[in-house]
Image: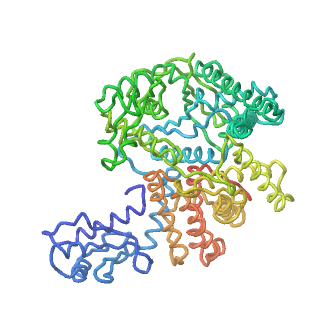
Amino acid sequence: MSSDPFRDFEQACLALLKSALPPDVLYPTEATLSVPPRRQFGDLSSNVAFVLAKALQRPPRQLAQEIIARLDVGAQPLIERAEVAGAGYVNFYLNDRAWARHVLQRIQSQGARYGAPDIDRPLRVLIEHTSVNPNKEWHIGHARNAILGDVVGRLFRLAGHHVEIQNYIDDTGKQAADSLFALRYFGDPPPPDKKLDHFWGDQYARLHKLLSREEDIRAELKERGDSEDDATAQSLRAELAEIERVQRGIEEMMHAVERGEYVEEVARCLNAQLETAWSLGVYYDLLTWEGDIVRSGLFQEAMDKIKQSPYVYLAQSGPKQGCWVINMTDFWEGGKSDEDSTLEKVLIRSNGLPTYEAKDIAYQMWKFGLLERDMLYRVYGMQPNGDPLWTTWREGEPRPRHHFDKVINVIGAPQSYAQAVVYTALRVTGHEEEYRNSHHLAYGMVYLPSGHMSGRKGVGIAADDVLAATREEAYRRVVEKRSAELSEEEMRRIAEAVARSSVRYTMVQNDPMKEILFDIDTVLSLDGNTASYLQYALVRTESLLRKAEEDAGIDTAELWRDVAGLTFAEMEEEEKVLVNALARYPAAIARSLAALSPHHLTDYAYDLAGIFTQFYHKCAVLKAPTAAQVRSRLALCCAVNQVLSNAFALLGLEKLGVM
């Protein structure tokens, strides 16, 4: 038996079909088993008769009838009967009692591991996510990136793979230099009640508001002419001179951050960002600083290797003269392109400066262990979950590094071309396997009703503010409903758990490629397809089990351990539907992993919560007609509790004792 109950049912049907074929007829590999659109047509349907009909030149319905006649249904306890349907489908029907016992036994025996896929061997998987420039607060779009990466990491760990989560820190980039210069230029101390990364973001936006005046000033001066007596023109020229002075100052700051002179200051902003990550239940294994990549010589080693390829050349003429260029035409997935300019990518400009893609190619090569050089490391600190956070650090120590089998980069969809360049460069330089195992988890942008977010313009909703607003709304509702029976501490704890879970769920409940028009009221809504709806369903299962213990004296833990002995007699349709839903959990996990898309799991969890709610309203549990039904329905509650708990652990949602 496998870890997937539904796969067991499929294998039972397949075994029956193979045994029912004549000795001289092989089972066709192209035959499929599928779930019919309505359960009245069976629980699985085979098209094997249609496939065989082509080869044997016989009517499919006649073949299906002969197969049915030879089936020994009694040999497979999970199958109750098989019938011919339509023009020749072979439909299989589950033995509901045996199926219920089988599904619940699987859930009980595997516990927190239920749903984990069977794998041939564990892989080393590197997931890079978040990578927010360390110069401002996270906006809600950054939170989507981090939470997506976090859930995908949890999925791979459940599957038994060795996962390392990295957060890339661009400490030598222009944005960090801009904010550092702004802090020095404006000279304002951070207000005591303002989080440091928010203050940095304010100063960054303030600086760019000043710089954005340049184009308008030049246009106005052109209209006014060169009159020295024009007071307004003089004021504009003075303003322009100041802007030019600021630009020179930023350039000097750029050189300083490239030399690593402000790394401790950048770390202070990063620490504030990490507080946001941890408040959302997001943790990392390694912080990778761009400055360390540059200083370690990794980039130069990567470029030396890349330049050995016959497809990488120094342009001698044309618009790319003096640039190192990679020709991807013969390697681009999908074949050659007429748009040669997109497949002739500059890696190093004529002034010797690398492009973003070139730096990312070096980083990707390092991730796969394709470079001999490495960085130095130290422990950055302990995280709230008790795990150490490592970091690259120029005064660190060597640390053993592993060759990763799969690399997943969580980066916004607008960067899809740049990521394709990075991966194709691996292929161009002879690393086909690494190319195939490089994955871009692209996601759509998060927009506001007023447009997209911009750190430069100071436009956006901070993730901290969303979490705080959701927390306050959750607290208000808890106070409204439960203030008479819960302590202040307990109400605050519930509000915190509901808020964090609501934000996390909102960020992963859609297909990653779907853009989100972010409305804070959607997150604040604690009804409908939300995390709190799932939390309420889970609380309901625990309430039922607690009442069984307290009011009926039933040892539910013992009942759950002995689930194999339950009879499941006279099952209602709602019970059968619930059992089938519980059996589909491993398939939801498998789909999420295959597509790198947690929304398959959120869809499943929401459906299961809804199906359980229907069962709860239609089927009495503690007041069921017979003692056997009380026990079997309590076992169903135990199973729902386990499966929802498993889904919560993967999605990073928090369980609540009460709501």
Where residue 518 appears, as percent x and y from the top left, is: 66, 56
Occupied quadrant, residue 230: top right
* Quadrant of the snapshot with the N terminus: bottom left
Where residue 536 appears, as percent x and y from the top left, is: 68, 62
Q: Residue at x 79, y 50 (%)?
A: 490
Q: Residue at x 36, y 30 (%)?
A: 317
Q: Judge by depth and name the residue closer to the eye, 133 or 244.
A: 244
Vertical comparison of 99 with 318: above or below: below
The answer, for residue 553, to whether it is visible in the render is no
Vertical comparison of 235 with 141: above or below: above
Pick out the residue farthest to the left: 24
Q: Residue at x 28, y 69 (%)?
A: 16
Occupied quadrant, residue 342: top left
**Left or right: 518 as drawn, with respect to 319:** right
Q: Residue at x 80, y 36 (%)?
A: 194
Where residue 611 appears, as percent x and y from the top left, is: 57, 70
The answer, for residue 278, to whether it is visible in the render is yes
Q: Judge by depth and name the residue closer to the eye, 643 or 653.
A: 653
